[in-house]
Amino acid sequence: MASKKYKSEQVKDVSALVKVFFTLGVLAVLLFIGLYIYARVNNSPSAVVDEYVSGFMAKSPSRIFRTLNLANTKFVTPDKLDTLLESIADYDKITSYSLVKTGEEEGKVSYQINYMMGRLESPFSQTLTLRETDETYLLFFNKWVIDSSSFIASQVTLRVPVGATLRVDDVPLSKGQIRKTTDKTIDYEMGDMFIGEHTFEAQLDGFRSYKGTFTLEGKNYGDEPVATVATNMLAPDGESQMIVKKLVARIVPMLYESMLQRRSFDYFLKEVAIEAETREGLRLRYEKMRQKHIDTRTHLTYVEFGEFDSKVKSTISTDDCYALCVDTRVPYKAYSTVVDYEERPRLEKKHGKLKIRSIFHYSSGQWWLYESEAFGRFVKYIKE
């Protein structure tokens, strides 16, 4: 009798365990059905596009931003999306819309949206493509997202001269955003940006800031800069103009003083910074002037220069560095020792005005003389 009682209790225990598992199985099925229904309501293509249009009509850039599944970066933000939509769609004036499914295939659905401004049809319309991603939604379902590539330009870069800083859409770029450098240029990378027009400002010490715009399309720009600031596009600021003007006013009298004292060109080099590329050429012209006008029987004795009047402008250099062109006029009195046929020397004086052009290049923190007509265009003096 005890054995029968034990067997009865064992049957009861098994029956209870089955009931528990059955109940859990039913709950799991109900949960999956609930999740499926929730996912269909909130993650279907129609649900996603409805959420987009709802945010669009509510003029809520943050909701639109989330629906487009965009990553928040320095240049891709809800505020910048708001600016874009206002510029391309004038969406503050949109009052209603119509939505039509235009295509469907595996993993992709397309919709056409037309907007109204009161009783008038808006010139702005949209074709939205939704695609099914590998990203999961509620663990079991693939997430549907709007293809936002038509809104985004990727791998956007801008090229400026070495040493320049850059602001894009009034946002300063850091050294960490430098993508590529050469001896003469820097490429800053902005990464992804919204399509449309953008502003930039390049600044370089010694030059006025350069401001410009560029317009982006929804594509990958790769290694090609969307805009380039060349050195000849930079105008020297007041300080740089004053520096090169003073250099001309210092170099020209020093040049004549050095020749009149019959000093070597190497001595002159100790006082004047001349670019290595043109140094030997200027040396030959220096020696030629000295031989022709100083080391002769009738020769220049000394020069009194008046006030230097110089005008400065940017110029294009052969090596693409920062170059300034200085056009100078300076009055002078040239005194010469004239020896006539009877070997009787006399001192003569002649008034004149010297007109020369000089080129300066900027590197290693200073301005270097690259070229000057002062090495050849000599002052006029009485010779006989």
Image: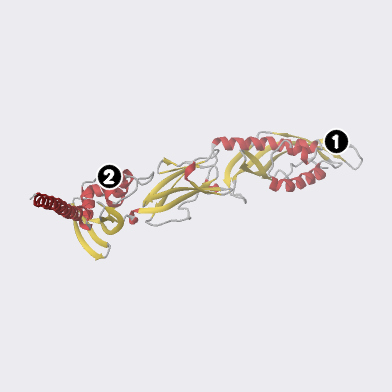
Q: Quadrant of residue 205?
A: top right
Provide residue 182's location: percent of width, then percent of height. 57, 49
Q: Which mark is residue 162?
A: none
Q: Earlier in the sequence, mark 1 or mark 2?
A: 2
In the image, taking residue 56 as reference, residue 155 lies left or right, namely right
Residue 103 vertical position relative to residue 292 in the rendered view, above or below: below
Q: Secondary structure at mark 2?
A: helix
Provide residue 13's location: percent of width, then percent of height. 13, 50
In the image, taking residue 306 as reference, residue 116 lies left or right, namely left
Task: Identify the colour scheme used.
Answer: secondary structure
Most distant residue in the front direction:
1
Q: Do the residues bearing badges 1 and 2 touch, measured as CB atoms within 8 Å?
A: no
In the image, taking residue 20 as reference, residue 55 lies left or right, namely right
Which residue lies at the image location 59% right of the left edge and 40% below the top edge?
A: 311
Residue 72 appears anywhere in the view: yes
Most distant residue in the right direction:
342
In the image, taking residue 271 as reference, residue 82 lies left or right, namely left
For this rendering, which residue is in front, 29 or 379?
29
Provide residue 309's location: percent of width, then percent of height. 62, 37
Q: Which is closer to the viewer, label 1 or label 2?
A: 2
Provide residue 207's location: percent of width, then percent of height. 53, 40
Dot 1 amino acid type: Arg
Dot 2 amino acid type: Ser
For this rendering, which residue is in front, 178 or 372?
178
Q: Which residue is mark 2?
A: 62
Quadrant of the image containing the C terminus? top right
For this rendering, which residue is in front, 142 or 115?
142
Which residue lies at the image location 19% right of the left edge and 53% below the top edge?
A: 35
Q: Which residue is mark 1?
A: 346
Q: CA distance from mark 1 to mark 2?
A: 90 Å
Which residue lies at the image location 90% right of the left edge and 43% below the top edge?
A: 341
